Image: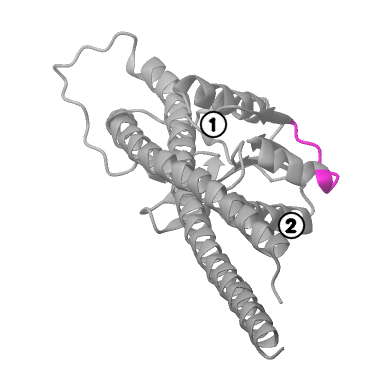
Amino acid sequence: MAGSGQIRQLKRRIRSVQSTQKITRAMEMIAASRIMRAQGRVRAARPYAEQIHEIIKGLAVSNEVREHPLLQQREQQRVAVIVNTSDRGLAGAYNANVLKVAERTIREEEGAGRQVDLYIVGRKGAGYFAYRGRRAEKLWEGISDTPTIDAAGEIAETVMTRYAAQELDRVWLVYTDFKSSLTQSPVRMELLPVKPEEFGGGQEIAPEFIFEPSQEELLERLIPRYVEAKVFHSLLESSASEHAARQRAMKSATDNAKEVAGNLSRIMNAARQEQITTEISEIVGGAEALGSR
């Protein structure tokens, strides 16, 4: 028979689950609002990257770009892998998926006899690799939620400096591509060396333009900005993907909490009904006993 103690315990559990439901619902709404802002930032950054690309393509028609240090193809002995993860959890399989691609990339490079240097964005990636005994060359924290162009510039400059000094022969960038609120795909991109083919098909800039500095110097400066823009794009895409994954995870948690609270309420109502029925039976039985004397 269900006692009053069991009913009190069920009430406490229901209140606890309902409190959790309120928290997950609030986190779901926050993540949804951040998705919109993150998508807006992706759209706002796109014209800048596209314009740099078009200018470089125009300059590449009349200038030799293959001599730039960031375009030099070398025999690959040492590679770097930049992994974009989040600083916070509660985002479903977001981090697990991108880390799986990073692990596969590292295994492929080490399987080919190359040494791998690891660069990590986000505490979750740092904790994952630290647990497995891998030390990151550098870790960037606090930028995954709202990336900035300054942070992207620092990341890009770190690997570009080492690549130009021939300390690295290839740089992979692993991040999550935001396709929609329901679909995000972990991808890897070869950041360095920059392929000359990326600047093919351009139209020569009209001769009435006067360049200051010269076309060669301008090209020298723009290619690093192009790499920086690609890093910034990956950070923005990862940020939007993280918020979308967190929204879905919190919605699932909210729905589960609602279902658990409903099940507990049904159990409590059944226990209360059983208790009432038992009490009525005892009263009726006592009345019949008194009446039979």
Q: Earlier in the sequence, mark 1 or mark 2?
A: 1
- Badges 1 and 2: C-beta atoms under 8 Å apart? no
Q: Amino acid at mark 1?
A: Leu
Of all residues shown, which one is farthest toward the top?
212
Name the quadrant of the N terminus.
bottom right
* Quadrant assignment, res 79: top right
For residue 117, above or below residue 253: above
Q: Label 1, on which residue?
A: 70
Q: Amino acid at mark 2?
A: Arg
SS assignment at label 2: helix
293 vs 37, nearest the viewer: 293
Q: Residues within 10 Å of mark 1 (few under 14, many from 20)?
A: many
Residue 193 image position (x, y, % from top left): 55, 39
Image side of residue 279 versus residue 144, left or right = right
Residue 146 image position (x, y, % from top left): 47, 29
In the drawing, what numbered circle is on residue 107? 2
Of all residues shown, which one is farthest toward the right?
133
Q: Is the magenta region chiefly helix, strand or loop?
A: loop
